């Protein structure tokens, strides 16, 4: 498991948005962006182009401010842009649109509410020409990930429903109140036998309900629902469901180890007959296999995978592989000489908070090339790789992030969601034969026409050892280089992640409040090669901190930053670096550590995943206590002079508050240093990206409120001791 705490010819269509969005700095009637503009944001998720390339189905995501949540519905738009996008399903919790092979139907998932709570999503189909949606499933634990069979007669999907759930559902009288009966006791006690027993966002894991492959008749008619069939059984999860082109087999990925955390990360590709039967392993590399796709003739399979380093590394770069479908074939790594990330995206706070953003993996019609998303030095685009040599050629270019995409079966046309620093992701269509992406949606145009937004400045500077560090500087809309500005250093998480050319509300809003925001990609960041990413192994935090300070020094040297009024913040991996920074230097006047780590030993024991393999530490805490202590900010807490705010999600199992903000807060209170802890009930590690809309807004308010108090001297009574 990878550690997750947590461009340059211009593209005309993307620059159409960029040019339009750069006007606000020149227009006096525009206003600064605010934190509450988030309530008006609209996101595009899960773009799915029809088999003939004529239409695109997608998930439109919007905020329901009154209910403090998000609503999703399936929308459809002609790929030639001849008509405006239109709602195709009513929502409010519809997702995962998938076209039938003949393009006549769309399968999707729908969750309905009961007693004010959303029920597990079920599988529906609707005529693509319009009409009434028809339910296909009513399973106790719902259905997800629909995939049509090649003949369009069957849909495979995933579900965690088990036999006990089905038996209970089959007893219609169960649950009726009987005053004379003694209620049967159902224990809520958890018996934990495995080291990984809870997971961020999912909560406590139920080992009795692994995710299995099911199928259902897509042609069911009449009042009765078709009876779904469970195809796989056993104690292991299966996902990535895909039919073979001939429809004879269903393929999926799975890790078949009971306790995989004792071993290096692994996940293999399997297949079994579509009607059920004996499972066989199709592909196995020394590492986990991710998304996969069949060649047009069905004889080869392309997949994304990660090879485990020897010895173990903290960062293993994802690659593109090809393997013959024939038994016993050995996979070939097509991108062994391509030293960037295959399939990874950029770090930002405006990926669609619901609806999903699947990555693309598509073969061209002649079977000679494979198209996929890649990340290179702050940009994420589509590349075409030769299936024999691995030679890469760009399909899109530009200062942008291709956040999600899909292709027609022959990869002649693509649907893409593209984001830039001044435009939330919109839907585009691209013809492989040539040209530039054409925009199909402009959902945020009305809002953004009101706003004064500017693109960040890309800079490169040299760190202490001469290593080149790429960074971006977001300046206020009315920036004057002759003035002195307050600086906020914003550190990304991961740590194997990367900032870049994508929209980030947080940076734009901080700049709108008068701050200069510096967001660098220090060593350890992804999208800069294997060596750059892995160099921090056993030294995190360490030299990456020095990279950050060199960036601050660079802006101070440029003369428009006040060196006496500096702020620093970051979340997850950026949270521990924030804590680390203020234990190493007193130069910052204020800091906000979000979803952080204070004590590595405590984190080792309580995080939702394990550190049992020697990727970040050479042993367990009791085996090398000095190393754990030396790299833990709490060890150096007495050196802190910077006022510190701690932001915590109370349901965060990735960086549990007890081993991060709570420790820092209690220690600083003991030392009588200025500190405050802000806690968000029910929120996970995804607080900044997909939590309740009001919590996302309040998080931004608190971060800037703290900097306003200690960098600008504003009175903020909420942070004072009563």
Image (spheres, helix red, strand yellow):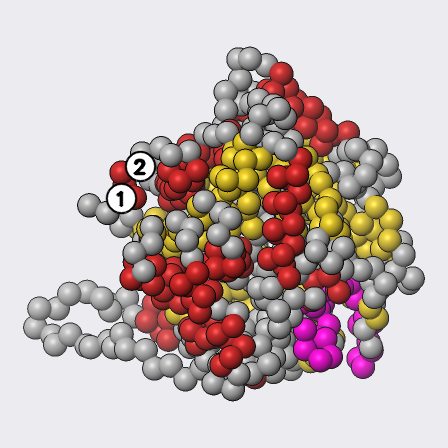
Check disc 1 and report the residue beneath it.
720
Mark 1, Cα crowd under 10 Å, few <14 / some 14-19 / many 20+, is few
Q: Magenta-highlighted stretch: main secondary structure?
A: loop
- The residue at the point 45 percent across, 48 percent down is 591
- Gap between marks 1 and 2 measured at Cα: 7 Å
Q: Is residue 259 visible?
A: no
Name the quadrant containing residue 367: bottom right
**Does 708 sit above or below residue 641?**
above
Instruction: Report whether 331 appears left or right of 4.
Output: right
Instruction: Report whether 111 appears left or right of 215.
Output: left
How far across and down, in percent of the image, does residue 47 sit? 63, 43
Numbered badge on residue 716: 2
Quarter of the image with the C terminus in it: top left
How far across and down, in percent of the image, does residue 610 sit? 51, 75
- The residue at the point 82 percent across, 44 percent down is 395
Q: Secondary structure at mark 1?
A: loop
Asked if residue 230 lies in the magenta stretch, the reply is no
């Amino acid at each position: 498991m990878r550690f997750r705490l947590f461009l340059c010819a211009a593209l005309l269509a993307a620059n159409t948005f960029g040019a339009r969005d750069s006007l606000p700095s020149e227009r006096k009637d525009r206003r600064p962006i605010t934190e509450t503009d988030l309530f008006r944001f609209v996101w595009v998720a899960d773009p799915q182009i029809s088999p003939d390339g004529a239409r695109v189905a997608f998930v439109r995501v919007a905020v329901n401010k009154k209910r403090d949540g998000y609503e999703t519905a399936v929308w459809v738009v002609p790929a030639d842009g001849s008509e405006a996008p239109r709602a195709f399903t009513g929502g409010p919790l519809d997702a995962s649109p998938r076209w039938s092979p003949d393009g006549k139907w769309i399968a999707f998932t729908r969750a309905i509410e009961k007693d004010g709570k959303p029920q597990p999503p079920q599988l529906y189909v609707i005529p693509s020409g319009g009409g009434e949606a028809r339910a296909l499933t009513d399973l106790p634990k719902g259905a997800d990930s629909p995939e049509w069979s090649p003949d369009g007669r069957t849909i495979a999907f995933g579900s965690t429903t088990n036999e006990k759930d089905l038996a209970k559902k089959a007893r219609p009288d169960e649950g009726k109140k009987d005053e004379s009966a003694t209620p049967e006791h159902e224990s809520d006690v958890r018996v934990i036998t495995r080291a990984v027993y809870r997971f961020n966002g999912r909560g406590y894991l139920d080992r009795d309900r692994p995710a299995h492959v099911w199928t259902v008749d897509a042609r069911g008619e009449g009042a009765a629902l078709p009876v779904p069939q469970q195809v796989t059984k056993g104690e292991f999860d299966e996902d990535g469901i895909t039919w073979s082109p001939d429809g004879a087999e269903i393929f999926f990925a799975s890790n078949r180890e009971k306790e995989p955390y004792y071993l290096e990360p692994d996940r293999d590709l399997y297949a079994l007959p579509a009607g059920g039967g004996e499972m066989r392993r199709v592909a196995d590399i020394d590492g986990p296999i991710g998304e996969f796709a069949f060649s047009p003739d069905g004889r080869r399979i392309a997949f994304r995978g990660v090879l485990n380093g020897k010895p173990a590394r903290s960062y293993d770069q994802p690659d593109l592989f090809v393997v013959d479908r024939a038994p016993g074939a050995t996979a070939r790594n097509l991108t062994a000489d391509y030293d960037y990330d295959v399939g990874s995206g950029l770090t930002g706070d405006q990926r669609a908070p619901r609806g999903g953003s699947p990555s693309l993996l598509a073969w061209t019609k002649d079977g000679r090339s494979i198209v996929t998303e890649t990340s290179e030095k702050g940009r994420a685009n589509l590349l075409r790789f030769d299936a024999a040599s691995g030679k890469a050629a760009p399909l899109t270019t530009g200062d942008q992030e291709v956040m999600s995409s899909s292709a027609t079966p022959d990869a002649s046309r693509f649907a893409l969601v593209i984001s830039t620093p001044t435009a939330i992701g919109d839907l585009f269509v691209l013809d492989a034969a040539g040209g530039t992406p054409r925009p199909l949606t402009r959902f945020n145009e009305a809002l953004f026409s009101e706003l004064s937004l500017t693109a960040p400045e890309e800079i490169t500077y040299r760190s202490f050892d001469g290593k080149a560090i790429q960074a971006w500087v977001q300046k206020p809309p009315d920036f004057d280089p002759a003035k002195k500005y307050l600086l906020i250093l914003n550190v990304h998480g991961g740590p194997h992640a990367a900032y870049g050319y994508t929209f980030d509300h947080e940076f734009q809003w901080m700049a709108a409040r008068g701050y200069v925001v510096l967001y660098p990609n220090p060593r350890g960041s992804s999208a800069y090669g294997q060596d750059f990413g892995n160099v921090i192994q056993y030294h995190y935090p360490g030299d990456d901190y020095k990279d950050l300070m060199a960036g601050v020094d660079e802006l101070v040297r440029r003369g428009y930053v006040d060196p006496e009024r500096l702020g620093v913040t970051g979340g997850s991996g950026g949270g521990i670096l924030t804590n680390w920074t203020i234990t190493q230097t007193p130069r910052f006047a204020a800091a906000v550590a979000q979803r952080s780590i204070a004590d590595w030993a405590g984190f080792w024991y309580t995080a939702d995943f394990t550190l049992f393999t020697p990727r970040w530490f050479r042993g367990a805490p009791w085996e090398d206590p000095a190393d754990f202590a030396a790299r833990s900010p709490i060890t150096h807490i007495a050196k802190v002079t910077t006022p510190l705010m701690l932001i915590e999600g109370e349901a965060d199992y990735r960086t549990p508050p007890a081993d991060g903000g709570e420790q820092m807060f209690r220690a600083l209170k003991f030392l009588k240093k200025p500190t405050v802890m802000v806690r968000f009930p029910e929120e996970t590690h995804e607080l900044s990206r997909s939590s309740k809309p009001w919590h996302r807004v309040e998080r931004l308010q608190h971060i800037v409120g703290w900097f306003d108090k200690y960098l600008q001297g504003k009175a903020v009574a909420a942070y004072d001791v009563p």
